[in-house]
Amino acid sequence: MKIVFASRCQQGLRDENQDRTGAEIDENKACFLVCDGVAGLPGGERAAQLVRDTLLAELHEQTRLTPANTHAAIERCRAVLHQAQRMDPAYARMSTTLAALFIDRSQQRAWWAHAGDSRVYHFRHGTLFEVTRDHSLAQQLKDAGYENTGINSNLLYNALGAEPARPVTFSAELMLEDGDAFLVCTDGFWLNLTTKEMEQALRMVNACEEWLALMEKAVSSNVKKDNLSALSVWVGEPQDATLLYSAADSARFLPPRY
């Protein structure tokens, strides 16, 4: 099954860019990830770099991906990060978010994992199918029915390297379909973009790179306080699937012909 992707990582108004993106893809497997160093503590960019590099190196050695070996690879990232914390007291509390999409190309299956508020979005037939739930106080309050609390969305209760250590959240396995599209991004990207805007952009383009560029343009119309990092991933031909289903949906609302 054909897979194409595009990647962006640009600095906003922050003093440094603690975001990292990465990809590992061959004929049997694929992984697309973002890491965002947790601000407010020294070493966020170092934590993000360590996790990205370790995860990609671990997956490179695998013939194919499974939920078990991707889980083991992430735990290896945690161990490497903890070792680095112990070796340098100045970075004893460095931590990072993670969002990673995994694909077994031979079995045409996908799953994803995340810690923190970096996200994985899955679109099918041009509309949102599923999205990760942030490990943040803002998400907990939203789940409890509180809206517009003004709570800082950066208040996280889970990140790699943070204490107490919490499990990374894994999705169930998903059987891929031609036309599936994914967005893997940091909070600096999704905070400035609604789901409807993502869907609308997907319906307006003919290439994966164009989809990401159009979303990036919409994000950039706002003040870019945070760093913007994202990967867009297309499986098969999303533009054809979107057009097909959009045409079918439109036909349902047309008046009958006599």
Image (cartoon, rainbow, N blue to C red):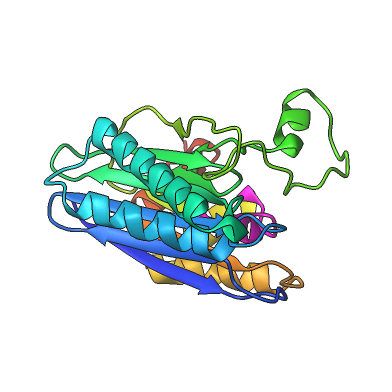
Residue 45 highlighted magenta (yes or no): no
Residue in the foreground of this view, choosing between 64 and 179:
64
**Is residue 190 in sight in this rendering?**
yes
What percent of the width, then of the height, locates residue 149?
A: 88, 38
Side (left or right) of 48 relative to 111? right
Q: Residue at x 48, y 71 (%)?
A: 8
In the figure, 128 relative to 200: above or below? above
In the figure, 256 relative to 216: above or below? above
Side (left or right) of 189 relative to 73? right
**Is residue 246 in sight in this rendering?**
no
What percent of the width, then of the height, locates residue 215?
A: 57, 65
Q: Residue at x 48, y 64 (%)?
A: 20
What percent of the width, then of the height, locates residue 15?
A: 69, 76
Q: Residue at x 49, y 41 (%)?
A: 114
- Dividing the picture into quadrants, the one containing residue 37 is bottom right
- Dividing the picture into quadrants, the one containing residue 191 is bottom right
- Magenta-highlighted residues: 185-195
Residue 191 highlighted magenta (yes or no): yes
Q: Residue at x 16, y 58 (%)?
A: 26
